[in-house]
DNA sequence: CGTGGTGGTAAAGCTGCTTGACCATGTGCT
DNA sequence: AGCACATGGTCAAGCAGCTTTACCACCACG
């Protein structure tokens, strides 16, 4: 029996490895399906474009990347028709990124697909245990910063 | 009370995002410290070199990357003195990768650092809840394949 | 022996970024 | 009105962490 303060890491595999494996399961699932040429990085960006639109700089800050990187992804997704951009009338320097109907559909589809994966996981470990798992994950993910 | 089958994902943030945030916390922690020029990818490789040694091809398969990529990392870590390689006397084509004492120390230090992060997390959500979280994570990470 | 499989390397290319340089527009001050 | 400085965005180059393609060296077999 381990002491009360012990973290049950004695299996020799630490959290980073385990989370990496879970992430890999998601990655592999999506990689094995046809998502019209979009990859995870694109989903991540698209997912962070709110309905009201957002400036490239703000989007980039949200994703913790440079505005240049943000701009590259926006250009790509504009080419595939998932977002469009308009000049901000209040500030003619700024471009506001908006999701197209196609972008909306993609986001909805991705959300649904992930929920399906979560349901499978919940079944594997039991819905209640999964709910607890997810609650702790949310608390830790909310984080100190 | 949610239904028995429900996944508590209604916060609109899915697992992938949450896990990404946790991984980012680990990444940022290591990035803010001096690890002698080694990065996460190097730790990952080093961590998968067992005491008895391992062939480059087997190491690469373990990490689910090509043998070429494996070879590149081994070359790098050989340059930094964290691993050494010897020709397999049974099969002169093969190179066996072994950790040096320096490599051993690094692995131990990384393990200790991660355990410290885990202890912080356990304190934040409570040791018991963290233990449950980690158990579920291990089960899901063990995976179907 | 030769024929095919396996261990490894070399070179080029791709993704997902970053850094640095720059221009255009906005904001505040005088 | 004029100027300084900040901010939004783009262009070009480069780096990390891989993959693909091509190849050579050695092994195992019949």
Image: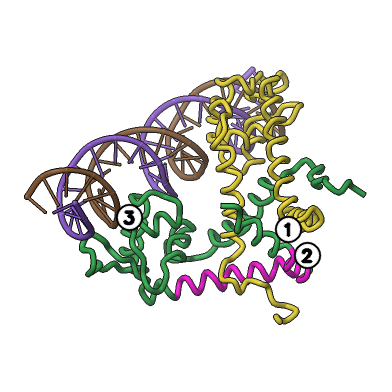
Chain colours: A yellow, B green, C brown, D purple
Q: Which residues are magenta?
A: B105-132
On what subunit does the disc labeled 2 rest?
B
Badge 2 or badge 3: first in the primary sequence: 3
Q: What residue would you read off at disc 2?
A: B125
On what subunit does the disc labeled 1 rest?
A
Where residue B145 sits: x, y (%)? 56, 52
In the drawing, what numbered circle is on residue B134? none
Where residue A140 sits: x, y (%)? 73, 58
In the drawing, what numbered circle is on residue B71? 3
SS for dot 3: helix
Task: Tell me if A45 is positioned left or right of C20 in this view.
Answer: right
Q: Residue at x 64, y 67 (%)?
A: B117
Task: Tell me if A67 is positioned left or right of B6 in this view.
Answer: left
The reply to whether callout 2 and callout 1 are in contact (CB within 8 Å) is yes
Q: Residue at x 31, y 68 (%)?
A: B84
Category of crowding for the residue at label 2, using alpha-carbon neighbours closer than 10 angstroms: few (below 14), some (14–19), many (at least 20)? some
Quadrant of the rendered image containing residue A93:
top right
Q: What residue would you read off at disc 1?
A: A140
As for residue B115 lying within the magenta part, the answer is: yes
Q: Nearer the viewer, mark 2 or mark 3?
A: 3
The reply to whether callout 1 and callout 3 are in contact (CB within 8 Å) is no
Towards the viewer: B37 or A45: A45
């Amino acid at each position: 029996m381990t002491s009360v303060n012990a973290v049950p890491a004695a299996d020799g595999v630490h959290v980073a490895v385990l989370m990496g494996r879970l992430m890999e399961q998601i990655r592999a699932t999506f990689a094995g399906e046809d998502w019209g040429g979009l990859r995870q990085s694109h989903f991540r960006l698209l997912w962070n474009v709110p309905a009201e639109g957002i400036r490239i700089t703000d989007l980039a800050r949200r994703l913790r990347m440079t505005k240049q990187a943000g701009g590259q992804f926006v250009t790509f997704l504009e080419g595939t028709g998932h977002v469009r951009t308009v000049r901000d009338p209040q500030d003619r320097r700024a471009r506001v990124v908006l999701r197209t109907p196609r972008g909306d559909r993609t986001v909805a589809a991705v959300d649904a697909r992930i929920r399906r994966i979560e349901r499978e996981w919940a079944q594997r470990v039991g819905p209640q245990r999964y709910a607890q798992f997810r609650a702790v994950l949310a608390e830790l993910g909310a984080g100190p910063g």
